Image (spheres, coloured by chain):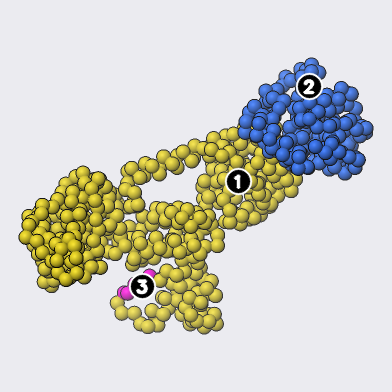
Amino acid sequence: MDDKMSIMVVDDEKIVRESLFHWFKKAGHKVDTALSGFEALEKLEKNNYELMFVDIKMPGMNGIELLGKVKTDYPDTIVIIITAYGSITSAINAMKTGASDYLLKPFKPDLLSLVMQKVVQQKKMATEYNYLRDRLEKINRFENIIGQSSSMEKIFRLIPEVAQTDSSILLTGETGTGKELVAKAIHAKSQRMQKPFITINCGAIPDTLMESELFGHQKGAFTGAVQSRKGFLEVVSGGTLFLDEIGEISQKMQIDLLRVLEEKKITKIGSTDPIDVDFRLISATRRNLENEIAANTFREDFYYRINVINIHIPPLRNRKDDIPLLVDHFLEKYSQEIARKVDRVSGETLEQLKRYHWPGNVRELENAIERAVVLSKSRTLKTTDFSFLQPSPVTRSGALSLNEMERQYILEILKQYGWNITQAAKSLDINRVTLHKKIKRFKLKKDA
Amino acid sequence: MNEKTNRIGILPIGKVPEIVPQSIAAHISGCLDLPAIILPSLKNIAGCYNENRFQYDVGKTLQTLESIKFKDIDKIIGVSTVDLYIPIFAYVFGEAKQGGKAAVVSLYRLEKDTHGKKQPSSIVLERAAKVMLHELGHLYNLFHCADEHCLMHFSGGLQDLDASPLYFCRYCSKYFLDARSKS
């Protein structure tokens, strides 16, 4: 492990800053200094510091206050408190607030050396801990499916159970909830994991092509069939077939598939010889198939065949507890992928993301984080980085007047931009004067 | 090697036993193959004294040494018997500015063991040589080394200093030779 660290020395005394700066420089560390808690927080916004030496007694914001803020917003940063005004009380205070150690200046050179050894050890342990925690999460959960809400926990428990059977599974849930990921997880946990997993998006393939795609054809079976071709039902042999958007297939195809599921045999187009097939069917839909049955657009017998086990994946707005976890996951993914140091989201932004209704579910959240990471100017994502999100539809309580709708909408936008008139006016596409007039007319208040 | 530009000047500060600068010069020639000459003594560094700490400010001492012009001298090593400090540390054995022109070594804390017992001069001279060579390493822009068996490894106390060797590890040696040829 590389022992060289990125260090910030925060002290209002220039001589102390310089002494420590030169000492750490000699040890080959990357060192920066700040003369106040405010300057330190500004620098933390832009760069990552692994270790901070913070003086307790500083004007404006004292060391303990700074320590508290650092431990809240940047918990991975190790903080060592230094002071000439050492007392047991302030030492206990600092340690309780999260300081890793406490130095009373002037200290012996070997003491600083010992502290540095301890810090290196602590950093090494934290790296190991994070690595093991990630591994454990991947083992306990399922790679790429993130969630800690009770509804997701239920799904995590269900996946290994249903994976051991061969029963058909129907996954229901809105678009973007991760139905395909659940299907892949079931396949990965099943006996069929070494065999193919094939996804067919039924909504994307025209009905005329679907038959040939699924069953395959013999050479000369129809115009253009210049050679024999295996269908997906044959190719998937031994594996799992995932039919996404199953609600989109025609009634004829429903009958054909129903027969395949009952007989476990297919006949290629243009052939008379049936072929044995062995696959596990997982289907998915965002539609309410029972309504489709009632409307006679979906066959009831086929529905019961594909819906032996039903797993419903709830929309993101119903499992808001998962949002912080998902945000962390996508932030890590995209800050690595895009190679930008954006590794945190402010508390206010997280609340904004939790409030948003996420019509596109996890997929929309992922895209939103990727966009925000690409465009962000600092390492912390702020509410303004998500200004592109459409505000939640105003809750209707009976019929709202146009005036009331306008009032609620303006208030929502103002809150979204933290009452920044310029940004809110820009978002509403009106000028600032007009916005001020509307605020006055609707008697809008900041704490409303 | 250009001897003129790589000449090291040993500058005794105040009353320093004659053998100390001689030993230091011998170590510079012997260990680093650099020419070293002993300069006329500097009377004192009274302006660097801190009355509150009863110690001498090493930062001011280095500034004083850097302000003195010596002909054909590339780096200056001050040798003193006074107690030196930097504001955050209780004391220092020696100090140098990274990549700078001057360093200083103090015998004050090298003459006794951790219990305050006076040490034989052979031990004191060896300690002084180690501190001086370490600081000279910094003058040639060497950083602290993670290898405990290297002179550039940080020694915060006498025990560490006594355990430290009188030579650089092979990486620091290489770096030192490169830096010396460029200076």
- In this view, the residue in front, A339 or A322, is A339
Q: CA distance from mark 3 to mark 1?
A: 45 Å
State whether residue B70 is above or below residue A247. above
Q: CA distance from mark 2 to mark 3?
A: 81 Å
The quadrant where residue A351 appears:
bottom left
Q: Nearer the viewer, mark 3 or mark 1?
A: 1
The answer to whether marks 3 and 1 mark residues whose Cβ atoms lie closer than 8 Å is no
Secondary element under disc 2, as helix, strand or loop, is: helix
Point out the stretch of residues depicted in magenta: A391-397
- The verdict on a common chain for dots 3 and 1 is yes
Mark 1 chain: A
Secondary element under disc 1, as helix, strand or loop, is: strand
- In this view, the residue in front, A284 or A427, is A284
Question: Disc 1 residue type?
Answer: Ser
Which residue does the image show at 49% across and 40% down from the upper left? Answer: A126
The quadrant where residue B91 appears:
top right
Residue A330 visible at all? yes
